[in-house]
């Protein structure tokens, strides 16, 4: 959350983060001034439609943004050993940044099938990760990897560790990815769409696993998803992003029961309900996300907004305004004059 909303010291503080891509066709402002705080032992959810900058934000934190993208502004302050380290200023290939990846911050990718090497066993990949961060023998690293497999509920871990990713089911692959992310004891876990492409039962099992691991290890979780049901179940606080900007932030109760931004309200209306009348059309958000090369001036949501104010919303971009206890919104409807 922003400075005016935080009550305790954050373990990770992102301020005015800007990550742009520079292809030949023009500039893509994938993340354009995002700010939020991640508090210890809590779960922060980042939500929004595809293309709003959620995953690029996560990759920016870990400094693994692929070319032609790069961070062009802002700070990413990590609390480490009693001081703050600005990850945005570190060389992505430096030993210090490599130690942060895995050692301080673990990442669960959206699709483990494309994240694991197809020509190495999952165990060897976890063993390599452990030995990269700890001066241990290959045998000791293997023993740690087996323990990590067991801790995430993989049956017969001493056998599964020698299998390839394609030999595992979708649920086991995701558990193996979580085991690798946690193998070096990070304080923060970034989970990027961890339940994508999984059936409903397996989704519930993965979410239960993350919750139990957080309680047991005292981890802090940054959960990136477009599934608002997952956010309601897992998160303490929520950041809503649209076109690279934070448009609303607050506690999960505030967002779900008293959403302020028209975009957040529209997202919530689009959730199917068991109380819906049969054969009625599910509400949708009018229009589509603007093309990244043709961003609108002013508020990025105004072309789709039912509360659009001509001459106001299309001229100036609103800042975040505190509207309640732990809640802020970027909308002219709530700006104080």
Image (cartoon, helix red, strand yellow):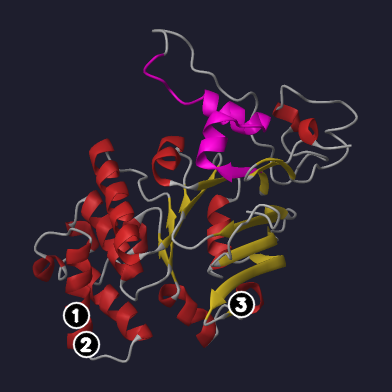
Residue in the image at 10% along x and 71% along y: 158
Decide if residue 125 is on the left or right side of residue 35: left
- Let me know if residue 48 is in the magenta part: no
Question: Of callouts 3 and 2, which one flags the residue occurring earlier in the amino acid sequence?
Answer: 3
- CA–CA distance in space, label 1 to label 3: 33 Å
* On screen, residue 11 above or below 242: below
- Circle 1 Cα neighbour tier, 10 Å, few/some/many (<14 / 14–19 / ≥20): many
Question: Mark 1 vs mark 3: which is more N-terminal?
Answer: 3
Q: Nearer the viewer, mark 1 or mark 3?
A: 3
Q: Is residue 258 magenta?
A: yes
Question: Label for residue 84?
Answer: 3
Residue 15 % position (x, y): 69, 62
Which residue is tagged 1? 142
**Callout 1–callout 2 Cβ contact below 8 Å:** yes
Q: CA distance from mark 3 to mark 2?
A: 33 Å
Quadrant of the rendered image containing residue 180: bottom left
Which residue is identified by label 2? 138
Q: CA distance from mark 1 to mark 2?
A: 6 Å
Q: Which residues are magenta?
A: 248-275
Q: Residue 130 at what x, y percent from top left?
A: 31, 80
On the image, the x and y values in percent for residue 122 come to 24, 68
Between residue 166 and residue 61, name the one nearer to us: 61
Judge by depth and name the residue closer to the eye, 90 or 165.
90
Query: Which residue is located at x 23 percent, y 91 percent?
Result: 137
Q: Is residue 35 left or right of residue 177?
A: right
């Amino acid at each position: 959350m922003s400075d005016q909303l935080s009550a305790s010291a954050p373990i990770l503080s992102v301020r005015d983060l800007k990550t742009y891509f520079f292809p030949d066709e023009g500039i893509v402002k994938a993340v354009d001034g995002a700010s939020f705080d991640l508090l210890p032992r809590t779960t922060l959810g980042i939500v929004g439609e595809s293309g709003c900058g959620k995953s690029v934000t996560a990759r920016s934190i870990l400094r693994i943004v692929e070319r032609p993208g790069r961070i062009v502004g802002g700070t990413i302050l990590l609390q480490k050993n009693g001081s703050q380290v600005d990850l945005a200023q570190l060389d992505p290939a430096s030993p210090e940044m490599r130690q942060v990846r895995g050692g301080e911050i673990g990442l669960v990718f959206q699709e483990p099938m494309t994240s694991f090497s197809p020509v190495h066993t999952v165990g060897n990949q976890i063993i390599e990760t452990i030995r990269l961060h700890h001066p241990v023998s290959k045998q000791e690293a293997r023993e740690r990897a087996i323990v990590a497999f067991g801790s995430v509920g993989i049956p017969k871990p001493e056998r599964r560790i020698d299998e390839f990713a394609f030999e595992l089911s979708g649920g086991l692959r995701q558990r193996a990815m979580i085991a690798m992310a946690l193998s070096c004891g990070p304080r923060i876990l970034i989970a990027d769409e961890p339940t994508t492409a999984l059936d409903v039962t397996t989704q519930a099992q993965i979410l239960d696993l993350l919750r139990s691991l957080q309680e047991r290890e005292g981890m802090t979780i940054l959960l990136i998803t477009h599934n608002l049901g997952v956010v309601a179940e897992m998160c303490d606080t929520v950041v809503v992003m649209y076109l690279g900007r934070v448009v609303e932030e607050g506690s999960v109760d505030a967002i779900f029961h008293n959403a302020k931004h028209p975009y957040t309200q529209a997202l919530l209306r689009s959730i199917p309900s068991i109380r819906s009348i049969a054969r009625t059309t599910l509400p949708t958000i009018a229009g589509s996300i603007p093309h990244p090369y043709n961003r609108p001036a002013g508020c990025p949501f105004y072309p789709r907004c039912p509360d659009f104010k001509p001459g106001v919303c299309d001229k100036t971009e609103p800042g975040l305004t505190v509207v309640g206890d732990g809640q802020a919104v970027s909308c002219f409807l709530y700006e104080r004059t």
